[in-house]
Image (spheres, helix red, strand yellow):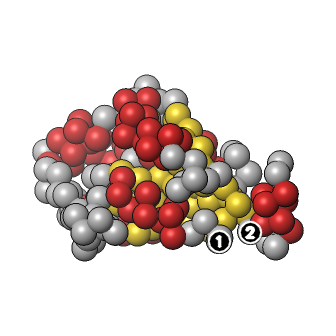
Amino acid sequence: MNFKNFFLLEQGQEAVVILPGGFKPPHKGHFEALKYLLKTGAKQAKVFIGKKERDGITQEQSLKIWNIYKKYIPANVEVVAVTGVDKAGREATPLSMTYDFIEDNKSNFSKFIVGAGVEDLRRFKGLEANKEKYPNTTVASIPPQFDRISGTATRKSIQDKEESALNFVPKEAVKDIDAIRMILGL
């Protein structure tokens, strides 16, 4: 650990996990991915939810479901619905907000751990390639959870109002199944 990181830790600053994505809807694979990233010892997490609606699942619904899930995650989790424009003046995305958040919070955290599935790692090359702009940043590859649960299949079962539609809910949140059912109109 270098002196700067030691100093930041001494000042009470710590690591933060960042999980960007669409999350339409957030499912048990996403929930477990966040818990996996928190095994790094970070006690704070930021989840960025994309704007784009997918098969009738909206950002607002995803936000409400994540706010239920975060009760069961042993960390201070802030869930953010991505809106507006990013620092470059383009339409904000979970990816661009991740870059902006790190750039804007270098003095607030000693380490940034960004989670990405294997297929998404290339989108974060800029974080590791530009260490001056994005210091103390690690992109962590998240192994598939639940045999790579499918968001597309989950949305289809919700659209079709199948009995299995709510199988995407993490076991910890099953006691909130009625609230999730209402959020999704099931």
163 with respect to 167 (left or right): left
- Name the residue that disc number 1 marks: 108
CA separation, marks 2 and 1? Answer: 6 Å
Image quarter of residue 49 = bottom left
Cβ–Cβ under 8 Å for marks 2 and 1: yes
Residue 178: x and y in percent read 37, 64
Mark 2, other Cα within 10 Å: few <14 / some 14–19 / many ≥20? some
Residue 34: x and y in percent read 54, 49
- Name the residue that disc number 2 marks: 13
N-terminal-most mark, 2 or 1: 2
Label 2 element class: loop
Image quarter of residue 106 = bottom right
Q: Is residue 70 visible?
A: no
As drawn, the residue found furthest toward the front would be 132
Q: Is residue 88 visible?
A: yes
Residue type highlighted by circle 1:
Asn
Which residue appears at 78% of the width and 66% of the height?
A: 8
Mark 1, other Cα within 10 Å: few <14 / some 14–19 / many ≥20? some
Which residue appears at 51% of the width and 70% of the height?
A: 104
